[in-house]
Amino acid sequence: MGDRARRRRLGPLAGLVVAAVVAAGCMGGGLDQGEPQQPAPRESGPAQASPGARTTRADGTTSVAEFKQDFEDAVGLAEKYWTAQFRASGEQFRPIRRVVPYSRAGEVSCGGQGLPRNNAVYCSAGDFIAYDVNWSVSAFREIGDAFLFYLLGHEYAHGVQVRLGIRYDFTIQQELQADCMAGAYLGDSVRSGALTLADGDLDEFREGLLAVGDDPDQPWFAEGSHGTAEQRSEKFFSGYENSLKACDLG
């Protein structure tokens, strides 16, 4: 994403990696309760890597340092976006308190349940996003930077749902709305000039979304359902193209 990006196409294992993680990664809509255990989480905040820069750009490299840079950029961009959206409605936005990287199963807990490896989750009572940093770096290298911005945007959307008091009867409704909200966050950021896309980034979003759909045999009403690949892609790009008005926020 950005002028300096070098495209990384989906590798043969990328779909399996993402499908195994993201489809199960939101822990029932990202609404489980709990505080992170040790180690103490890092406070999230606006990205600091490019002081004075007006446009977020992904670096296009595959190092851990560059992954960290892109992730911080994604967090900062999400905070800026949702702060502006709430302000436009006459409300004050409270950013998600923490973004917590972990590297071992059970290192971070949500609702008394240790998070497994290969996961990303929003936990509402502690108001934090936690992610397996080793898996996230691997997905970054396999799939690319655009997917990283989507992943953060989806989990951040669950925090926004909590702030708006949104709770559906079925997990799939919560998850598809979060996909739409992630699409709106990215599409609006591109249109405002806060984010630039490189050639192939939209294809990266599309291919990544096709990889994260539920198993075709999973009932839509089952706890933990996120939606088929087609449903998730449709919701994301509906938000990307039409902004938040497509996301049924009321």
Image (spheres, rainbow, N blue to C red):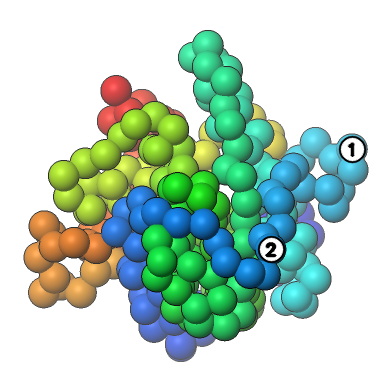
Residue at 13 percent across and 62 percent down: it is 222
Q: Is residue 31 left or right of residue 122?
A: left
Q: Is disc 1 placed on a helix, strand or loop?
A: loop
Quadrant where the N terminus is found in the figure: bottom right
Which residue is under mark 2? 40
- The residue closer to the viewer here, 55 or 175, is 175
Residue most extreme to the right: 51
Quadrant where the C terminus is found in the figure: top left
Q: Is disc 2 placed on a helix, strand or loop?
A: loop
Residue at 80 percent across and 36 percent down: it is 54
Q: Residue 189 location in percent, x, y?
A: 60, 37
Classed neighbour count for the residue bearing mark 2: other residues with Cα under 10 Å, few (<14), some (14–19), many (≥20) = few
Residue at 56 percent across and 76 percent down: it is 107
Judged by depth in the image, the label closer to the viewer, 1 or 2, is 2
What kind of residue is marked 1? Gly
Quarter of the view holding residue 192: top right
Residue at 67 percent across and 70 percent down: it is 39
- The residue closer to the viewer here, 21 or 126, is 126
Label 1 and label 2: CA atoms lie apart by 29 Å
Which mark sits nearer the N-terminus, 1 or 2? 2
Q: Residue 185 location in percent, x, y?
A: 52, 39
Q: Inspect this view and state whether residue 15 appears.
A: no
Q: Residue 212 location in percent, x, y?
A: 35, 68
Residue most extreme to the top: 90
Residue most extreme to the bottom: 12
Look at the picture and state if 20 lies above or below 36: below
Q: Is residue 115 left or right of residue 212?
A: right
What kind of residue is marked 2? Ala
Which residue is under mark 1? 52
Q: Inspect this view and state whether residue 169 appears.
A: yes
